[in-house]
Amino acid sequence: MRLIQNFINGEYLDAAGGRRFDKRSPLDNKVIASISEAGAPEVDAAVRAARAALKDEWGALTTDQRVELLYGVANEITRRFEDFVEAEMADTGQPSHVMRHVFIPRGAANFKVFADVIKNVASESFQMATPDGRGALNYAVRMPKGVIGVVCPWNAPFMLMTWKVGPAMACGNTVVVKPSEESPQTAALLGEVMNTVGIPKGVYNVVHGFGPDSAGEFVTRHPGVDAITFTGETRTGTAIMKAAAEGMRDVSFELGGKNAGIVFADCDFDAAIEGIYRSAFLNTGQVCLGTERVYVERPIFERFVQALKAKAEAVRYGRPENPDANFGPLISQEHREKVLSYYRKAVEEGATVVTGGGVPDMPADLADGAWVQPTIWTGLADDASPVREEIFGPCCHIRPFDSEDEVVNLANDNIYGLSTTIWTNNLARGHRVAARVEVGITWVNSWFLRDLRTPFGGSKQSGIGREGGVHSLEFYTETRNICVKL
Ligand code: NAD
């Protein structure tokens, strides 16, 4: 069994008193790692190390020197690709192809891309007139914000964590990362990469633990943390925002979603089925951008439901390393209980269960894992709880619609506003509907495609702020104005 320790000031450390908690495999519920749980003293040590590094070696580097080191981090992640794949598969139980093609390569890209962004960003300058005719030059400089608290979820742990750590470090900040208690391994492994590459001690720190009254709350309440970037549930975001109010710390939040898929009758039918299938079931439905509400124009409704059903019923459950498997378990027994409670609620609230709705029969060695069936419902009212609330599982409700106005109103009738995917061959309609849906990101005839330089974030209760490309700089730097009389 592995021991996963906190990474503070360049060293792997146990918590005082040796507090530990177990990490169980989602595949079979067996304990696979023992995690050292940081208390307030360890979090304090991590924040102090991060503050010291701001002033010392890291703060003294030029942008070019930092950029070279970040390229080194990206290269070292690529060199240790298999270690990261293995660690992430162990934590999440997801098929290896998702790790290999999306989550781990994106982790390396998060260091490379943001190094390039900081290298190429321009700054503002204005020449102004003065009464003596000599004028003055105003210009802006970007300074690091300081120590950034990075609080992460479990659904794509490495990709989502590095998406914050990469730009934070590129901008000259230092970080204290609190990975999810369900997925601590890749954040821990990244410490080895930082040491190999020669990132100064204290720039990257990791503290393990839970949320309330544990490492998560200790990080977000610590007065030495200058700003907090968080990905997770909206309810948790509310608690963190309250903590951040003390000391007027800035926040960047990527929160929950209840995303709509809109399928017009004029779409490329096969492409739409494939796109909605992926958006509802990839990563066993544990994707913030995933689709849990599908609206299909009436003429193709029945055909669409049957085609999606056939695909959902063809998933192949199995261990991550099994090349035939394309469908993994949920992250934990606790999360499975939540998802299954919605499977029950859907029936109670009058759904027709098109497929799924329960737990698959698994072989004996996987019988204790967090497996659920991909599930499709029809017939629920628009105010039914499985239609309104984020479930974060492999399930969706499909409802027919008759007009563009109707479907825009349905899509917007939710507290969340993270993403939408629209399927149509009428390009004008695609643009028109995309501009009317109240979300941070809209895909037309695609899903989950994104250049890291573009803005990313949620509308309504799906987030605060935008990250990506130069937008990340808005959060991870403070712009200061300097005025020089000429
Ligand atoms: P979560 O909110 O339960 O936990 C996220 C992190 O916050 C964990 O590290 C947890 O320990 C910590 N935490 C919990 N309570 C805390 C508190 N009071 N103070 C400080 N830290 C606390 O989320 P999760 O279950 O890990 O992840 C799933 C959620 O994340 C879903 O709602 C999903 O939509 C969302 N998500 C959003 C995006 C996005 O980009 N918008 C991306 C991925 C996931």
Image (tube, rainbow, N blue to C red):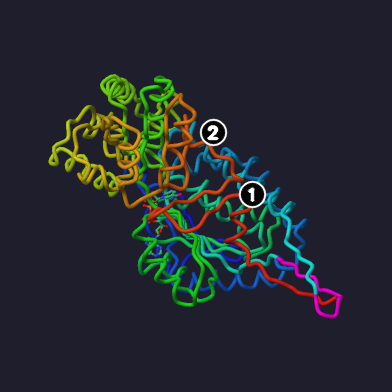
As drawn, the label of residue 101 is: 2
Label 2 within 8 A of ligand 1 by Cβ: no
Disc 1 crowd, CA 10 A, few/some/many (<14, 14-19, 20+):
many
Residue on which the image places disc 1: 111
Q: Position of residue 112 (x, y in %)?
A: 67, 46
Q: Is residue 246 left or right of residue 173?
A: left
Front residue (pair 251, 430): 430
Q: Position of residue 251 (x, y in %)?
A: 49, 64
Specify whether residue 343 is painted magenta: no
Front residue (pair 479, 30): 479
* Image quadrant where one finds the C terminus: bottom right
Q: Residue at x 61, y 69 (%)?
A: 146
Hey, what amino acid is under mark 1? Phe
Q: Is residue 149 visible?
A: yes
- Picture quadrant of residue 354: top left
Segment tinted magenta in the rendering: 130-141
Disc 2 crowd, CA 10 A, few/some/many (<14, 14-19, 20+):
few
Q: Earlier in the sequence, mark 1 or mark 2?
A: 2
Label 1 within 8 A of ligand 1 by Cβ: no
Q: Residue at x 37, y 66 (%)?
A: 239
Q: Is residue 400 left or right of residue 48?
A: left
As drawn, the label of residue 388 is: none
In the rendered image, the vertical position of residue 166 relative to residue 276, given as above or below: below
Hey, what amino acid is under mark 2? His
Quadrant of ligand 1: it is: bottom left
Q: Residue at x 69, y 65 (%)?
A: 142
Q: Dot 2 lies on which element?
A: helix
Specify whether residue 132 is painted magenta: yes
Front residue (pair 272, 337): 272
Q: Dot 1 lies on which element?
A: helix
